Amino acid sequence: MKYFKESEFECKCGCGANNMQEEMLRRLGNARQFANTPFSLNSACRCEKHNKAVGSKPTSSHLTGWAVDIKARDSVSRYKILGGLMRAGFNRIGIADTFIHADCDPKKIKCVIWTY
């Protein structure tokens, strides 16, 4: 990918799991281009063990390669990232103080934005 290294998508526990979906990666690359600002990934693919360790739900889209969490620590970067994600077709977005969760999991409800 143009904007990301393969290693950025691997599970952060070090197990090497990486089952990111091609459609997800395509949209993420488009979002990065539209936002015109770097995306630093806090989390992408997660194995079941790591997902449980970070307190996420057993139905998390990170487990199936449909989600990423992008670092966003200020209002300007949050605005740019959010705009890029929406323009790229992300339809499931969670906004926290320090990151934005983006997913396009086809098995989950669409057109939702939530806060943490």
Image (spheres, grey):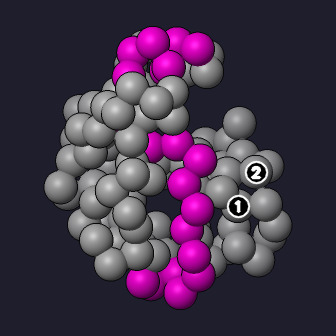
Residue 69 located left or right of residue 18: right
Q: Are marks 2 and 1 in contact (CB under 8 Å)?
A: yes
**Residue drawn 50% across and 19% down?**
50
Q: Mark 2: which secondary structure? A: loop
Q: Which residues are magenta?
A: 33-53
Quadrant of the drawing holding the C terminus? top right
Q: Which residue is mark 1?
A: 72
Residue 104 located left or right of residue 13: left
Label ID, residue 98 = 2
**Residue drawn 69% across and 67% down?**
78
**Residue drawn 43% across and 34% down?**
11
Q: Nearer the viewer, residue 19 or 84?
A: 19
Residue 94, compared with residue 13, is above or below; it is below
State how far apart marks 2 and 1 are (Cα). Answer: 5 Å
* Residue 107 visible in the snapshot: yes
Q: Mark 1: which secondary structure? A: loop
Q: Amino acid at mark 1?
A: Ala
Residue 45, compared with residue 1, is above or below; it is above
Quarter of the view holding residue 5: bottom left
On the image, the x and y values in percent for residue 68 come to 46, 48
**Residue drawn 57% across and 76% down?**
38
Q: Residues within 10 Å of mark 2 (few under 14, many from 20)?
A: some
* Residue 103 visible in the snapshot: no
